[in-house]
Image (tube, rainbow, N blue to C red):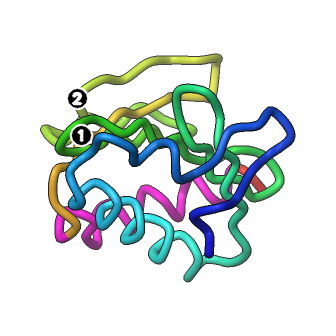
Amino acid sequence: MSHHIMNTNGHSVGEHFENREPVVKEIYKAIVRTAKKLGPVQQDPKKTSIHLVRKTAFAGIATRKTGLILTLKSDSDVVNKRIARREQASAHRWHLEIKLDAPNQVDQEIAAWLEKAYQLAG
């Protein structure tokens, strides 16, 4: 089970879902399922988030009590009401934060942003 994926720093995917509503895991699974349609994806649990990695990280997921925050890499600014925070990391790198509180919010739009991030991380 992916629940027991541990990385070298001793963090597990499972710990990010402790004391969280069950829906949080469902949203996470929907994101991972969508990402895996693009190709191989590694789940790399960190202290405060889980990174989804191709060659480099293309997404970060920080769980909250009843939802999660998906952070995606982008090569351009994206202005959209779904994006809670936009941060320019460097000349051609933006980090986009999207708050999700239901699995069905992982839709075509999120899939398109995930795909763009995945391409950048290759």
Q: Is residue 71 above or below residue 30?
A: above
Mark 2 or 1: the one toward you:
1
Q: Amino acid at mark 1?
A: Lys
Instruction: Tell me whether circle 2 and circle 1 mark residues in contact (CB < 8 Å).
Output: yes
Q: Which residues make up the magenta segment?
A: 104-120
Question: What residue sits right under mark 2 in the picture?
Answer: 84
Q: Which mark is residue 99?
A: 1
Residue 44 in the figure: left or right of residue 109: right
Point 47% across, 77% down: residue: 33
Could you say which quadrant of the image residue 37 lies in? bottom right
Percent of width and height locating residue 62:
42, 36
Q: Is residue 80 above or below residue 107?
A: above
Point 49% across, 29% down: residue: 95
Residue 56 in the figure: left or right of residue 27: right
Percent of width and height locating residue 103:
22, 66
Point 40% across, 48% down: residue: 17
Q: Amino acid at mark 2?
A: Ala
* Viewer-nearest residue: 62 or 56: 62
Which residue ends up furthest to the bottom in the rendered image? Answer: 37
Could you say which quadrant of the image residue 69 lies in? top left
Q: Secondary structure at mark 2?
A: strand
Residue 22 in the figure: left or right of residue 78: left
Dominant SS in magenta? helix
Q: CA gap, disc 2 to disc 1? A: 7 Å
